Image: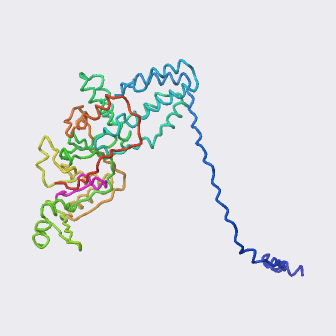
């Protein structure tokens, strides 16, 4: 028998052993009602206090030096209570010094990284600054104390754009309090943006009414632009991403024109007239009339549009109305940004960001058919508001405060520093500006 079992698979050998007979089961016991056991509720655990980082007197002294020198960055030493820090240093190392130095260092980090101006004073500022996510305050503090390099940690927060350096250089040369206030306000605006804007990007300065294509902080090409009229159609400040270049775009006419100006009623029953004028008209089951302007030289978006989805419906585009580019004041649109030389910009964007060949870009433009080319590289676009900045020729200049947005910033800088909140952008009404006319 043992020899026979030696040739039987192991699982078969186990099966060959008779299983023990199970004892009878009393099924009536299994269906008896039981008293439900109340769930165990864990007692709340109080959060453990975060231990304060330890400050040596040398590190605290370095912080005091940085506070006294922060005026060169357009901030105010008094905001960071140098007297309180000096008193804590005199007392020596311990809890009071740890608490005071940590608090004041945190305030300096926040202001140099994110800006001192409270969000309530940043009118129509919807450009979310990612720096506090990329470089959290607690990590900055821990690293600075580990390396014993307070000033280095603060310097690493400063904007890298050359305009910030130009403003910093101009601040001690200001000849009037008004000039100083304007320079400080615009230095702070740079802190509202990402510290590093990227290796290549588009930047529109609304007060200057100019757009620049920038690669490694060098302006490759600049373009005149038409921006929004002051008031409800003022162009908001945004930081978005170009997702595609559209050659020969269509334009869905807003209902304010379709209904408000009678365009839909005039064309809905006259398809030949609609075709002659370059429109396609449809009527939905609920009676709503939709009018879409077809590609062509007379399209309100011209021959190009940069697709940069955002809740404001703001984008950069061409226009058939070129005369406005010759005007000195070009705050004339319903919010969107018209670009002089937009066709060249579209082709350049297609080549730099979507991998098109020059021949491909020319062919897409000349096709006169709607062609959307998705971007294969991340291409940021910033719509900013600087009233003191370098112009496209590199000269530091003042620009007309076309929307009156300096006053609240300057007023906030004249008041005591406010504690930062979690707010990251304006809470003002989002006005969908979808009319390029």
Q: Count the marks: how many?
A: 0
Residue 420, position as x, y percentages in the image: 41, 37
Give whichever of 420, 324 is nearer the camera.
Answer: 420
Q: Residue at x 33, y 48 (%)?
A: 380
Q: Is residue 53 magenta?
A: no
Residue 193, position as x, y percentages in the image: 35, 41
Provide the major secondary structure of the magenta segment: loop
Residue 331, position as x, y percentages in the image: 17, 44
154 on left or right of 403: right
Q: Residue at x 46, y 27 (%)?
A: 151
Give whichever of 65, 289 is nearer the camera.
Answer: 289
Q: Is residue 301 magenta?
A: yes
Residue 130: image quadrant is: top left
Q: Residue furthest top?
A: 90
Which quarter of the image is occupied by the C terminus?
Answer: bottom left
In the displayed structure, 426 sits above or below 92; it is: below
In the displayed structure, 110 sits above or below 56; it is: below
Q: Residue furthest right?
A: 1
Residue 137, position as x, y percentages in the image: 48, 37
Magenta residues, as a range? 300-316
165 on left or right of 320: right
Q: How is the image coloured?
A: rainbow
276 on left or right of 69: left
Residue 112: image quadrant is: top left
Give whichever of 26, 209 is nearer the camera.
Answer: 26
Which quarter of the image is occupied by the N terminus?
Answer: bottom right
Q: Residue at x 52, y 21 (%)?
A: 88
Q: Residue at x 27, y 22 (%)?
A: 173
């Amino acid at each position: 028998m043992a020899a026979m079992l030696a040739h039987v698979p192991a699982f078969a050998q186990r099966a060959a052993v008779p299983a023990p007979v199970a004892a009878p089961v009393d099924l009536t016991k299994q269906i008896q009602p039981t008293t439900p056991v109340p769930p165990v509720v864990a007692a709340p655990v109080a959060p453990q206090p975060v231990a304060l980082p330890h400050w040596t007197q040398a590190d605290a002294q370095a912080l005091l030096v940085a506070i006294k020198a922060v005026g060169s960055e357009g901030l105010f030493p008094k905001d960071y209570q140098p007297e309180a820090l000096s008193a804590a240093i005199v007392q020596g190392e311990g809890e009071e010094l740890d608490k005071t130095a940590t608090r004041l260092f945190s305030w300096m980090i926040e202001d140099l990284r994110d800006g001192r101006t409270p969000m309530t004073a940043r009118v129509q500022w919807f450009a979310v600054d990612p720096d506090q996510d990329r470089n959290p305050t607690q990590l900055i503090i821990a690293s600075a104390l580990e390396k014993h390099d307070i000033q280095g940690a603060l310097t690493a927060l400063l904007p890298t754009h050359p305009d910030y350096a130009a403003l910093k250089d101009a601040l001690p040369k200001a000849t009037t309090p008004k000039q100083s206030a304007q320079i400080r306000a615009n230095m702070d605006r740079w802190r509202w943006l990402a510290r590093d804007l990227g290796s290549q990007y588009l930047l529109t300065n609304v007060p200057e009414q100019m757009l620049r294509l920038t690669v490694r902080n060098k302006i490759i090409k600049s373009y005149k632009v038409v921006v929004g009229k002051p008031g409800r159609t003022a162009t908001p400040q945004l930081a978005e991403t170009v997702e595609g270049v559209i050659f020969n775009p269509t334009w869905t006419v807003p209902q304010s024109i379709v209904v408000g100006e009678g365009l839909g009623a005039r064309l809905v029953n006259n398809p030949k007239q609609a075709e002659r004028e370059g429109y396609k008209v449809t009527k939905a089951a609920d009676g709503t009339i939709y009018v879409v302007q077809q590609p062509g030289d007379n399209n309100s978006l011209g021959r190009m549009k940069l697709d940069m989805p955002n809740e404001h419906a703001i984008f950069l585009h061409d226009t058939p109305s070129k005369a406005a580019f010759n005007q000195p004041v070009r705050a004339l649109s319903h919010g969107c940004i018209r670009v002089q030389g937009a066709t060249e910009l579209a082709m350049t964007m297609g080549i730099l960001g979507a991998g098109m060949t020059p021949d491909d870009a020319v062919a897409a433009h000349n096709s006169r058919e709607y062609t959307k080319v998705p971007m294969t590289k991340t291409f940021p676009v910033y719509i900013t508001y600087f009233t003191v900045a370098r112009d496209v020729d590199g000269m530091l200049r003042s620009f007309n405060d076309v929307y009156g947005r300096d006053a609240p910033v300057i007023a906030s800088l004249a008041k005591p520093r406010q504690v930062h909140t979690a707010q990251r952008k304006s809470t003002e009404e989002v006005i969908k500006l979808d009319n390029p006319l």
